[in-house]
């Protein structure tokens, strides 16, 4: 806390979740002799009070702070923002047409607005640059482990101010940008679908459309709120939002909008509410104020996608992870490691041999030898050590006769891991195909109190695309089964079944699933038969082959920590 009791601004700059707070068109709260700062004060203090909860990193005001731009109005409003400076919070504000002469541009010279707001927001240390006349500012902040820029553009910018913006973007070419200004899009037909104003079209053509870094624009001025999406010159989406509630009861009641960015989920969640009304006891709210607690229409409460890796790839590409040779992932205890690199589009020959990269002799050969059924491809999981995969089109693989892995009982635990990508039309008829499995039957392995004809161990996929590890341990006659959640198709997954000698845990992309039983179990029973990759047996004969793409598959004779998975460093 600061000496005045204001919470000290302290965001987590590395967290994948962060929030940008937005205010707009508070002008009716500061109109001549009608000065009512309470609603703005409540919003600013709410942002500070909940900063840690929401990991708020910045606050932006979109202009028309006041109705007439008069000294008394501006001074009253500006005093409320002092609480941000005392907390060390970064923020921006820009002039709207009611804060200055609406017929002027940013060469207008001194005004009460410039005197009270020019250069503000310095306390947070984000101010990067300002236009020659001081009416537009550029702020650089850090969130989700990377820099971001917020542009705060004047009501009407001259060429000099726009040149300042272009220079900053050129100096920071890999930084994503949120552009804020007072007028850009409008949704005054009541549909919530925003369209450009004449000035907004000019800004779009000059500063937004040519600069792929700008992924989001925010403006006020017009009401009601609305939004739209346009494609820029790079072919990427730009989200354009108008935020304004001045026409609502209480001059908008200090409506606060939160943009909650979740980089891990690839989503931005937006909500709009009035901290001023929320702070009032329900019994004390009048009938109209009760309608302003929050705005829940499609233009005020919504989500939109933001896949950072994809959207920012044109100016800030994520470096591709280099392929790693087998020696780099040959962890102690490796019993078999199969890699499927090769010329994309070429099929494995009927007599092909996929060598065991561990050097233990557990090589693979085709199950059926069907021509053209095992095809190499360049597709791979981003973290796979091998930059290539194997498309299974009606065939699978098995270990060669005499492979030592057939007799292994894993007394010290095990890790069975694989990369898999399911096709879009994976369905009912594809279910219960094995990714990795043991040949033979539970009965032949001396087990099978459940189904004696099922294999001793299998990592399979259900018709609902759930991964299932079903295995008969050496420590009991019954199987132990682990289940994942549904795995969406057309993306790569890393699966790992890990036994530490006490229990078995199934991991998806390095995360333990919820359906992991606590049943004590140790080892894996064996019928002495080959292991299958991309296939599964039932009653001792081939039951079904997997229709999917496989990446590296590895079996280790101990429990690996997540850091030692094939996805690890």
Image (cartoon, helix red, strand yellow):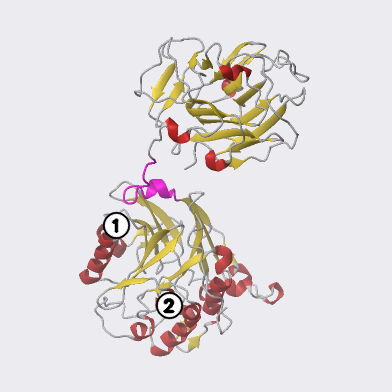
Residue to which mark 2 is pinned: 123
Q: Position of residue 409 (x, y in %)?
A: 66, 23
Residue at the outermost left position: 159
- Secondary element type, mark 2: helix
The residue that appears at 49% across and 41% down in the rendered structure is 568
**Closest to the observer, 130 or 276:** 130
Q: Is residue 526 left or right of residue 295?
A: right
Residue extent of the magenta highlight: 306-321
Tell me if mark 1 has few (under 14), some (14-19) or many (20+) residues whose alpha carbon lies within 10 angstroms of its own: some
Q: Quadrant of residue 530?
A: top right
Q: Main secondary structure of the magenta part?
A: loop
Question: Of marks 1 and 2, which one's residue comes earlier in the chain?
Answer: 2
Query: Looking at the image, how many numbered discs can be counted on the residues?
Result: 2
Residue 436 marker: none
Residue to which mark 1 is pinned: 173
The relative height of residue 558 versus residue 269 in the rendered view (above or below) is above
Q: Position of residue 135 (x, y in %)?
A: 31, 76
The residue that appears at 45% across and 71% down in the rendered structure is 24
Q: Are marks 1 and 2 in contact (CB under 8 Å)?
A: no
Q: Position of residue 82 (x, y in %)?
A: 47, 82
Residue at mark 1 to residue at mark 2: CA–CA distance? 25 Å
Q: Position of residue 6 (x, y in %)?
A: 56, 79
Q: Is residue 522 left or right of residue 549?
A: right
**Closest to the observer, 371 or 136:** 371
**Closest to the observer, 158 or 494:** 494
Quadrant where the image shows the N terminus: bottom right
Tell me if mark 2 has few (under 14), some (14-19) or many (20+) residues whose alpha carbon lies within 10 angstroms of its own: some
């Amino acid at each position: 806390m600061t000496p005045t009791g204001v919470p000290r601004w302290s965001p987590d700059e590395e967290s994948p979740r962060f929030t940008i707070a937005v205010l707009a068109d508070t002008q009716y709260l500061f109109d001549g002799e009608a000065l009512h700062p309470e609603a703005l004060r409540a919003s600013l203090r709410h942002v500070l009070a909940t900063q840690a909860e929401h990991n708020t990193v910045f606050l932006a005001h979109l202009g028309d702070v006041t109705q007439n731009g008069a000294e008394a109005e501006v001074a009253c409003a500006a005093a409320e923002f002092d609480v941000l400076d005392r907390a060390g919070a970064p923020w921006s504000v820009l002039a709207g047409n009611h804060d200055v002469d609406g017929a002027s541009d940013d060469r207008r010279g001194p005004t009460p607005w410039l005197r009270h707001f020019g250069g503000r927001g310095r306390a947070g240390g984000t101010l990067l640059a300002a236009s020659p006349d001081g009416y537009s500012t550029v702020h650089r902040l850090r969130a989700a482990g990377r820099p971001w820029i917020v542009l705060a553009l004047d009501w009407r910018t001259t060429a000099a101010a726009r040149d300042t913006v272009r220079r900053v973007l050129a100096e920071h070419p890999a930084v994503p940008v949120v552009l804020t200004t007072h007028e850009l899009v409008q949704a005054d037909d009541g549909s919530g679908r925003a369209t450009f104003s004449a000035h907004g079209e000019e800004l779009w053509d000059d500063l937004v459309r040519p600069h792929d870094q700008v992924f989001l624009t925010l403006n006020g001025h017009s009401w009601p709120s609305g939004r739209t999406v346009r494609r820029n010159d790079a072919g990427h989406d730009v989200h354009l939002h108008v935020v304004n509630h001045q026409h609502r009861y209480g001059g908008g009641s200090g409506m606060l909008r939160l943009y909650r960015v979740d980089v891990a989920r690839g989503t931005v969640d937006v909500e709009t509410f009035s901290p001023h009304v929320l702070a009032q006891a329900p019994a004390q709210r009048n009938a109209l104020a009760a309608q302003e607690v929050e705005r829940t229409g499609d233009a005020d409460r919504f989500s939109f996608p933001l896949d950072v890796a994809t959207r920012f790839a044109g100016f800030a590409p994520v470096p591709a992870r280099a392929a790693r040779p087998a020696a780099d992932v040959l962890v102690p205890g490796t019993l078999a490691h199969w890699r499927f690199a090769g010329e994309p589009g070429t099929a494995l020959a009927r007599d092909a041999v996929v060598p065991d990269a561990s050097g233990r002799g557990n090589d693979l050969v085709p199950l059926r030898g069907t021509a053209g059924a095992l095809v190499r491809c360049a597709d791979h999981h981003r973290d796979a050590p091998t930059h290539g995969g194997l498309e299974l089109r009606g065939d699978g693989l098995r270990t060669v006769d005499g492979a030592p892995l057939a007799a292994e009982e894993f007394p010290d635990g095990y890790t069975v891991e694989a990369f898999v990508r399911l096709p879009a039309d994976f369905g009912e008829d594809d279910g219960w195909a094995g990714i990795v499995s043991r040949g033979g039957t539970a009965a032949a392995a001396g087990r099978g109190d459940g189904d004696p004809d099922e294999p001793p161990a299998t990592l399979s996929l259900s018709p609902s695309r759930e991964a299932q590890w079903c295995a008969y341990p050496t420590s009991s006659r019954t199987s132990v089964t682990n289940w994942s959640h549904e795995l969406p198709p057309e993306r790569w997954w890393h699966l790992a079944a890990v036994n530490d000698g006490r229990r078995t845990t199934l991991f998806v992309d390095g995360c333990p699933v919820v359906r992991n039983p606590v049943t004590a179990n140790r080892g894996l029973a064996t019928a002495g038969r080959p292991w299958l990759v991309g296939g599964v047996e039932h009653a001792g004969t081939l039951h079904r082959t997997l229709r999917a793409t496989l990446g590296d598959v590895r079996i280790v004779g101990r429990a690996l920590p997540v850091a030692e998975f094939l996805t690890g460093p």
